[in-house]
Amino acid sequence: MSTADDPRINPEEWQAQERGLRAALGGQRAGPDDVDYLRIAEAIASAPQSGPPMRFAREVALRIARHDAGIERWVSRVLLAVLAIAALAVGTLFGPAWWSAIEQTAGRAATGWLLAGAACVAVSWLAARWRTGGRRHP
C-alpha cells in the first residue's frame, strides 16, 4: 500500500518528514517546512542507547558465585547432615519392623531382589560420582 492510497496521510506532510529525516542523517540544511522534523530526527538520533554495560553478564555471574558460596552453602550442608542423622535414626528405630512387614508382604525372594536393586542403584551412583571426580552435573 502506498502513501497515496491512504486518505489519512497528507502527502506534503509525509514529504516534509522525509526531507527532515534526510537532512538530519545527511547533515544537510532543512527547508523552512522541514525544521520541526529535522529537530525531531536529531533528537531521536541523539537519544542515549540503552543496553547492559560492558561485562554485565560476567559481573552478574561472579556476584551469583560469591553469593552461592556464602551462608546458603553452609546451611545446606548442615541441613543435609541433619537429614542424614534423622534418616539413620528412623531406620534404626523402625527399620526392623518395616523390613519384617516387607518380608511378610512380598516374601523372602522379593526382598532379596529389592536389596539387589538397591545395591545396583548405589553402585551406579558411586561409579558416576567417581567417573566425574565428584563434580556435579549441570
Image: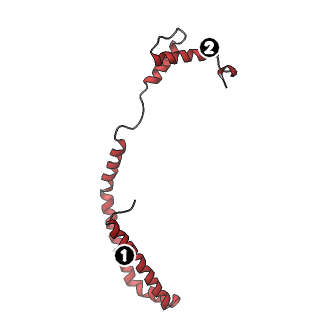
Residue 70 percent across, percent down from the top left: 30, 56
Residue identified by numbered label 2 = 12
In the displayed structure, 115 sits above or below 26; it is below
Residue 115 percent across, percent down from the top left: 43, 84
Instruction: State left or right for residue 12 relative to residue 22.
Output: right
Quadrant in the picture for the N terminus: top right
In the displayed structure, 133 sits above or below 71; it is below
Q: Residue at x 35, y 74 (%)?
A: 84
The numbered mark, 1 or 2, whose residue comes first in the sequence reads 2
Of residues 89 and 28, the one nearer the viewer is: 28
Disc ID at residue 86: 1
Q: Residue at x 36, y 79 (%)?
A: 89
In the displayed structure, 26 sits above or below 54; it is above
Secondary structure under the numbered disc 2 in the rendered image: helix
Q: Residue at x 52, y 88 (%)?
A: 106
Secondary structure under the numbered disc 1 in the rendered image: helix
The residue lying furthest to the top in this view is 32
Quadrant in the picture for the C terminus: bottom left
Instruction: State left or right for residue 68 relative to residue 40.
Output: left
What crowding class fits label 1: few (fewer than 14 Cα within 10 Å), some (14-19), or many (20 or more)?
few
Q: CA distance from mark 1 to mark 2?
A: 83 Å
